Image (cartoon, coloured by chain):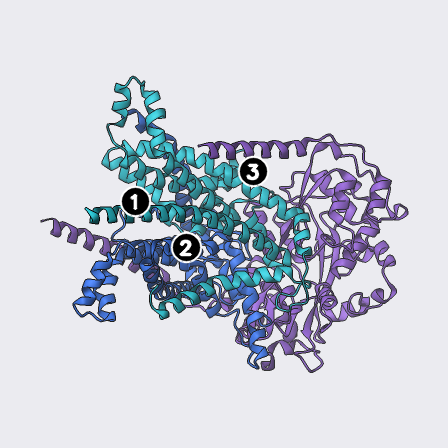
Chain colours: A blue, B cyan, C purple
Amino acid sequence: MKVSRTLAIPYVVWVLIFTVVPLGLVIGFAFTNPDGKITLENIFEMSDYMAVLFRSILFAIAATVICLIIAFPAAYIISRANAINQSTLIVLLMVPMWINFLLRTYAWMTLLEQNGVINRILGAIGLGPYQLINNSGAVILGMVYNYLPFMILPLYSVMVKIDQSVIEAAQDLGSNKIRLVRKILLPLSMPGISTGVIAVFVPSVSTFVISRMLGGGTNDLIGDIIEMQFSGNSYNPHLGSAMALVLMIIVLFMMSLFNQFGTEEDVAL
Amino acid sequence: MKSISSKVYMYILYAFLYLPILVLIVFSFNQSKSRANWTGFTLHWYADLFRDERILTSLLNTVIVALAASVLATVLGTMAALGIHSMGKFGKSVLMGATYIPVINPEIIMGISLMILFRFFVAHFNFQFGFATLILAHISFDVPYVIYNVLPKLRAMNPNLVEAAQDLGCNPRQAFFKAVIPEIMPGIFSGFLMALTYSVDDFVVSYFTSGTTVETLSVTIESMTRVKVSPKINALSAIIFVVITAILIIKNVLENRRLRRDMALSRAALKEARGK
Amino acid sequence: MKRLICIILSLSVLLYLTACGGTAETEEIDREAVLEEFGLDPELFSDYDYSRLKDEDITLNVANWGEYMSINDDESVDVNEAFEALTGITVNYKTVASNETLYSKLLSGGATYDIVIPSDYMISKMMKEGMLQKLDFDNIPNVNNVMPSFLNPQYDPYNEYSVPYLWGMVAIIYNTTMVDEEITSWASLWDEKYAGNILMFNNPRDAFGIAQAYLGYSLNTENKAELDACSELLKEQKEIVQGYVMDEIFDKMEGGSAAIAPYYVGDAVTMCDDNPDLAYVIPEEGTNWFVDAMCIPTTAENKEAAEMYINFLCEAEIALANCEYVGYSTPNAKAYELLDEDVREDEKRYPSDEFLAEHTEVFVNMSDEANAYMQSLWNQLKIDNSNVWFVPIFLICLVAATVAVNVWRALKKKREQY
């Protein structure tokens, strides 16, 4: 099948034009000023946005950890159900994912508002109103809600392969629940955890809509600042590219930290 | 799902996932524009929705862009997968690495990098932001999913298949279309579906590459949430929810029927074996 | 495979249908019938030739602020539909959040608008940077409807690039069920009583404008000490602000999610109509008086059609429909005459010239240096500042860590192989 190697040529050209060149342009923009001179000032200017960068990383870590804590038991429970229940539960998990994420986030806006559904219900029993929206909690909640299935699905797909007899054997040998999780489940589901962590962390650290809708302009994240440099309040694509570069490096770091199992083919979940 | 605590846990989890969507849907039937105060039942937001030209146009745009991009991505991706499959180790790992970039790169970076590229096109060629940029951008993030779905099928294929076909009198071209393609068709199809899903759902990349003349549904929704939000959006989400749930339920029922049959068969086989 | 073919077939049918829709022969446009259909009085309409471009299959890209034109409302003329029916031109109407956003959209090249409606100071900035083209007033005879006091303004002294669309002032809007006192001053936006219930402008110029008015500075001050003082004041306010918003304010104020906020008078009128609990006031310290005017960017592709659109928006009844719908004040003399008596006498919407002279100030385009300084103060406000060297060092550490992790892993793998 030597001939068929040439079939990849259009794709190679495509990758060059639409993946490699654009990334090269971003890097080029990051190290030049509007006059086209090479400069490092964009990188230095980014220091103004240090707090935002940290906030983004912090929020993304928080969302990832919360997702992991919620998803771990859920994935385990699903993986131990019988085959029919399993597929039903997984489908039920997917349905919200198929609805546009803007609509899902908008739904939370209507719930959390000062005058929203939750505050009204609380009001009816004489509580509140509480400030539920436009704070960091609401933004993290939005991330957890939107990306939770990205954590459950990979965890489920490794846990379902763990043989029930392994778990039973451990129990027979006198493991309590904590030991069972620590010695058996956690090590065996490590590949799922890595994939899930990356699948939640990457979109969380780079989001720009969730923070605007649920953070109310007081909790800007690095994604919002990048968007602002390209089509928002302050126009400076060079600074925006420098920020994008920083974001890429952060993602690269997370990848190398967590993806020790990832040969490329594993990603196609 | 044995213990009560795990049942309770799952109910809470699914309530968390569904409650916001249900609230959205309930308020699509609300008489007033209020999103928290129930004032009476109505269907007029649905009627309004179907008269709203902007939403309908962007829905059509979404369909056009998603179909065009995923069809083209399927062709490009299948060809690429065939090529990669027959490559040496080095070429394979380089190309797979490049394929990996759009999957793992944050969407916003993909969006702005393509935007910069297209701006360059606009400046130097007779080129405008619009359908072309959207479809090109969508193909770029769709192709990897096609490749990831087709490659495993190629690997699972018997390497002697082509030779066998040729021994049976096929020319190489016939061997390819009659032996290889049917073998990897399920992979191509699931790759296509995945690409379609990602295209329909995409917001971030479309936001940066759509320009001003063509809007996809997500871009329209986003700009609507910036100004006064109309319950038409609730009506729209209700419709999307119902359609998607219906599709998935049908799919699930069919699969479960097959599963049940398999289970019954294996049980019967087990009994028979024990009987012996 | 069959399914795939079905999908492709249906796609092509779809494309074919839409293509057909686009190329249908245009019929003669019956002007009287169109005007009647939209409830417009032919007597009040100029005899301008609106149908001359009907066969050219033009799509006009219009960028405007949110809730800033009479469209999509059952009770009021849909201005864009009327224009489409009258001219055979398709209008592609888009909304933009702020002047600064419009500026970056135009510069970034992703946007090709034929009509934009920026505010005064942004118009002079765009003029200076060559982003606008001169208008051909032969195509816009209705410019004569504009009140003389709005012609040759400071931002466009020779009246070459812009035609005023609407104007207004910045007011405080508040919810009377959440605010007990009479609001008279910008100071209320810094009142601890309303902590967590205050909304603020999410753009530097308007936000600084309020601090400047409160402190009694000129709204166009370029004095760094004064700008610093404003920035301090805004930082202080940040502690009690619920959110920084633009058009999201409609939803939040009407829904009772916030108690008090600064916004434009016209929008305040709209919000008060929708929620009777709301009220608005022009603070005693004075405020910003702004004019938004229609311009054509240099990148526009349909200049003549764009000028036709501008002329159409200057028609008495169209200008009337717009100003009644959006609640802003009109610079159009003929539309003003058609307004209800009580609106014309509303001091907050049509203040006297003396009031405007004494209590208001128009934004002018500041020097690039001052603009950049204000922008950096604004960035610091929304983001706390820190050490310049931090990012580079942080990045180097991150890169080093990435390399280290990978090298370590490779070594470990090698060791395991032996």
Disc 3 is placed on an element classified as: loop
Chain letter behind tag 2: A
Asked if disc 2 and disc 1 are in contact, CB closer than 8 Å, the reply is: no
Which residue is the site of mark 2? A88
Q: Residue at x 49, y 31 (%)?
A: C5
Disc 3: which chain? B
Estimate the x, y position of residue A267 in percent, counting from the top left: 33, 48
Horizontally, is C377 left or right of B102 in the view?
A: right
Residue B128's mark? Answer: 3
Amino acid on which disc 2 is placed: Thr
Q: Residues within 10 Å of mark 1 (few under 14, many from 20)?
A: some
Type of amino acid under label 1: Glu
Label 2 neighbourhood size at 10 Å, few (<14), some (14-19), many (20+)? some
Mark 2 vs 1, N-terminal side: 2
- Residues marked 3 and 2 touching at CB (< 8 Å): no
Give the residue pinned by disc 1: A265
Residue B143 is situated, as x and y percent measured from the top left of the image, at 40, 39
In which quarter of the view is residue B148 placed?
Answer: top left
Chain for mark 1?
Answer: A
